[in-house]
Image (cartoon, coloured by chain):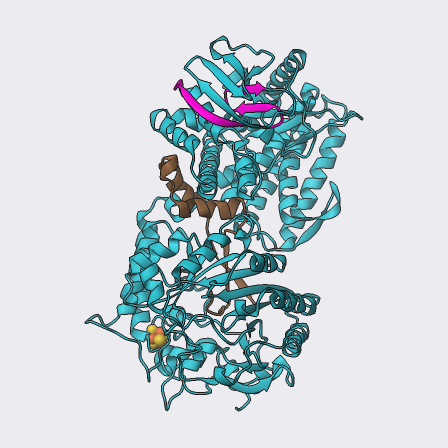
Chain colours: A cyan, B brown
Amino acid sequence: MFRASGAGPPIGQYILKVHGRCDLACDHCYVYQSVDQSWRDKPRSMSSPVLRAAARRVAEHAAARGLSRVRVVLHGGEPLLVGVERMRELLACLRSTIEPVAGLDLIMQTNAVRLDAPMCEVLKEHGVRVGVSLDGDREANDRHRRFANGDGSFDRVRAALALLRTPAYRELYAGLLCTIDLANDPELVYEALLAELPPRVDFLLPHATWQHPPPRPGDDPTPYATWLSAIHRRWLADRRPMRIRLFEALESTARGGPSGSEQLGADSVDLVVIETDGHYEQVDTIKTAYPGAPRTGLTVLTHPVDDVAVLAPVAARQTGIDGLSPTCRTCPVVTQCGGGLYAHRYRPGTGFDNPSVYCADLRVLIDRTNEENRMHAENGKPEDTGAVPTAVIHQIASGFGDAETIGWLAEQELAITRALLFAVVDQHGANAAWEILGNVEAMAPDAVREVLAHPYVRPWAVERLRGGGVSYLGALAAASAVRAGIPVEVEVEAVDGVVHLPEVGTVHLPIGATGPARLRFDGAALRLTRSGEEIVADLSRHAPTESWQPVRRVALADGWTVRIEDGDPARACHRWPLTGRLRDDEERDWRSALAEAWQLIRAEVPGYAPALRTALRTVVPLRADESGAQRASTARHAFGSVAAALAEPADLAVLLVHEFQHGKLGALLDLCDLFDLNSDARMMVGWRPDPRPVEGVLQGVYAHAAVADLHRVRLGRDEHAEQVYAKYHRWTVDAIDGLRATGGLTPLGEDFVDRLAATVQAWDS
Amino acid sequence: MKTVPAIMESLAEPLATIKAAPLKGIRAEQAARVVRRIVDNESLLRRLDVAAFNSAP
Ligand code: SF4
């Protein structure tokens, strides 16, 4: 094998064949069914010395080339065949050797038939993400993916996927890999894949070369394009419900971006395979070309990665379009297609210097998807294409937001809560309460909306989806029915001595009472039965009793109604201690402080008032700090709520404005990325002693700008205003400069920060 | 392993469908997208790997 000149390209991806055999005998597998049969001579699994050497070679190469991240794909054969104990050792070895030098992304590609909870624990411990091979519905999958005895693998794979969807292991689930077979109905395949709720799907064209072309039954000259286009159209019509790498790659390359896939595009391919015996090889799919095609003759025991990187076949895949065949170089779609998968170009005589054997299909597929994407973008409303309205972003970025903008954000937040509620039921199973909620919604949708807009429904749902929490569904169903005036009987859950019905009120039980209770509403009175005792609340009287506290609504000037929330156990997501149930005098103090604070906000900083009036629904009383310091907090998942210790009205006004800024920005951050979530950037800020991540700084800047603004207005009227203004103004301006310098903002985030900076600058004039 | 930011999505797309549906008519896959974003903090800035190996991730 001859060498190319120079040091060769840096290699960032390693396919590690940790086990050389497979427990399925799929007849389309490129490892076992292709012309290259070298697997027969390899050891069954990778030995410890080979593994250690491989890990050292990867680390050594990353250090020498200054790679900040590398990816190791555990592959086979079937990697799960190594078993739990060996898997643990293997992962520990890879991490301890590579991570001191470079970030390590660990991925496993598996048939998943052996994936069980103990294995998932090990994979979770080491942060391995799992891609599972599934070819579609039962018929499609079991057409090829069978055990040696002929049994299909579909049920075993689905059981593994169900495990990967549980809260404990959801973080492992990377996606599905589906090999195309024209005998399968594309829509049925799409639906079967979608039913597994994969974060991501990739389609693989069957292995083929010009010497062994793919089957093309029937008259259609481009049946693979036809098959994939059917899925593309359905995917667009369904609003892209899952990520499909092939289609994302085509969208990206259509705009001149990278393809992110070996199958398409002219991205340089920086990967090397390490066999079970330690040999470096070219990627496996090249096995389909000719015997020994992937061999390099080098091993991890004797050669550094650099020696593989300079080999001509590896280097040839680095040269982009210039390295393609003359036909491809003059092809109008070459920037999107890139000549297709390297292995598919092989023809005896000319080697890989040809277009793909799928050329005709690729050409048609690319033209069609481009056209379909264009039509979808033109015909859809902005929301259909996933855009957040520009006006919303601009208004929030300015620091404010009118009623329409904030109302739009609140609608999105409600939709998020509804989706999470649905997901909770999907995860834990439907029950009578879910039925009731659906029925009430059909009769009185506004009642259900009101209840689900309660800010603490989402924190509860998030906790539930992470595997904790108790059932709140009964309470949501009961509250909705009561709001709609519909008689209901349902099981509810008491938590720490209360049963809370959002937007209705709280039943107070003996302290600490926890567990199921029965709740009945006859259209006028609520009856809660627990352990043989009954508590009755006459809702028509709107009066609190020892065991019943109606929701505490505070109607303020200018149409703002806010609730003082001292009952819902789900509010315990703020980082400060909460008060218990308020006494009458405490409620009176809160009511008057809120009324005065609101009056001040309207008079001093009316620009912030529409947002509060539209979407701040709830104030949660916190226990006062013993030293008298102010306390307030916003919980990331509780849009529409602010927690605070009671303060003087002038201070409460600042706390409400400040905290609700976090709420507005949090709601926008739910919808779009203003910063790169994968960025490790940290920066120093004036208000904290430790370096902060980009999100923390962005949140700080956004809220502090409002605090500065409020004290700017108080200059001359409040003796502390000048000092406070100067401090917050400096913090804000410095942190805006710092944010711009981190490189961690997205283009949208940069625009956002520029707009906020413009607001702050305008104060100087 | 190089990744490049490629496509910016927003959650507005699945939410538009969810808003229009009754609770029981929400599609599981749309809800799953929301869960990945909100509960699992998934990035909407789609980074595409530069020529990643053909495996699902
Ligand atoms: S469509 Fe055919 S000719 Fe054009 S780049 Fe792809 S393989 Fe080459």
Q: Where is A599 relative to A11, above or below?
A: above
Residue A276 position (above or below residue A251): below
Count of numbered labels shown in the rendering:
0
Identify which residue is drawn at 71% across, 32% down: A725
Looking at the image, residue A689 sits to the left or right of residue A150; the answer is right
A655, A161: nearer the viewer: A161
User: What secondary structure predominates along the stretch shown in magenta?
Assistant: strand
Visible in this render: residue A592? Answer: yes
Point 51% across, 47% down: residue: B37
Tell me residue A760's x, y (percent).
63, 38
* Residue A491 colored in magenta in the image: yes
Residue drawn at x 66%, y 71% is: A66
A335 left or right, relative to A294: left
Q: Position of residue A417 (x, y in %)?
A: 48, 36
Span highlighted in magenta in the image: A485-508
Horizontal side of residue A442 vs B51, given as left or right: left
Residue A14 drawn at (x, y percent): 56, 73
Quick check: A425 above or below A603? below
